[in-house]
Image (cartoon, helix red, strand yellow):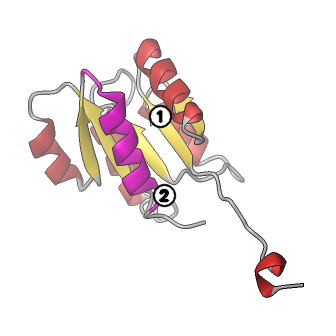
């Protein structure tokens, strides 16, 4: 049997956590990413996302898509808590926001990227493809 037929191909599905208080945006983004072959979980705010991530045995996302302005725990509050937790700090974050000062806030929050609302799904998927691949496992 030729060596090329002995190779085993392993496909790893990338996992993305979508954090946004707007149900329509969460559902649209989740559906679009699933159609592209990503595994997706979602949270309504930073507190819910943090609770999920801190659950023992919870699957770690390859990327977090994070809204800035949310009730209960904002995107910036979530990011501060994420960075303070060594087990979560390496997960890349892309901000998804309509905030006028999102670029300046992105710099201070040390995020991987920014996608402005209203969303272009093509741009969003491009960011997911680029940044989800930066984390291995």
Q: Which residue sits at x=37%, y=30%?
A: 73
Q: CA–CA distance between discs 1 and 2?
A: 15 Å
Q: To which residue does mark 1 refer?
A: 18
Residue extent of the magenta highlight: 118-133
Residue 67 lies, with reference to residue 108, above or below; the image says above
Which image quadrant: the C terminus? bottom right
Residue 124 placed where, x, y %?
Answer: 35, 37
Residue 132 placed where, x, y %?
Answer: 46, 54
Which image quadrant: the N terminus? bottom right
Label 1 Cα neighbours within 10 Å, binned few <14 / some 14-19 / many ≥20 = many
In the image, farthest residue toward the top: 24
Reading the chain from its start, which is encountered first: label 1 or label 2? 1
Q: Which residue sits at x=36%, y=49%?
A: 93
- Is residue 56 located in the magenta-colored stretch of the structure? no
Q: Is residue 53 left or right of residue 11?
A: left
Q: To which residue does mark 2 refer?
A: 88
CB within 8 Å, label 1 to label 2: no
Q: Secondary structure at mark 1?
A: strand
Q: Quadrant of residue 8?
A: bottom right
Q: Which residue sits at x=83%, y=80%?
A: 6
Q: Is residue 110 left or right of residue 4?
A: left
In the image, farthest residue toward the right: 1
Closer to us: mark 1 or mark 2? 1
Q: Secondary structure at mark 2?
A: loop
Residue 23 placed where, x, y %?
Answer: 47, 14
Dot label at residue 59: none
């Amino acid at each position: 049997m030729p060596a090329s037929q002995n190779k085993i191909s392993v496909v790893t599905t990338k996992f993305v956590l979508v954090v946004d208080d707007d149900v329509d945006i969460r559902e649209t983004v989740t559906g679009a990413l699933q159609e592209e072959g990503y595994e997706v979980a979602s949270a309504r705010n930073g507190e819910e996302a943090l609770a999920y991530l801190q659950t023992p045995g919870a699957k770690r996302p390859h990327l977090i898509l994070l809204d800035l302005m949310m009730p209960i725990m904002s995107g910036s509050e979530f990011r501060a808590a994420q960075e303070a937790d060594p087990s979560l700090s390496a997960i890349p974050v892309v901000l998804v926001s309509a905030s006028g000062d999102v670029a300046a806030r992105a710099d201070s929050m040390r995020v991987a990227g920014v996608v402005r609302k209203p969303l272009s799904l093509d741009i969003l998927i491009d960011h997911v493809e680029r940044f989800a691949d930066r984390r291995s496992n």
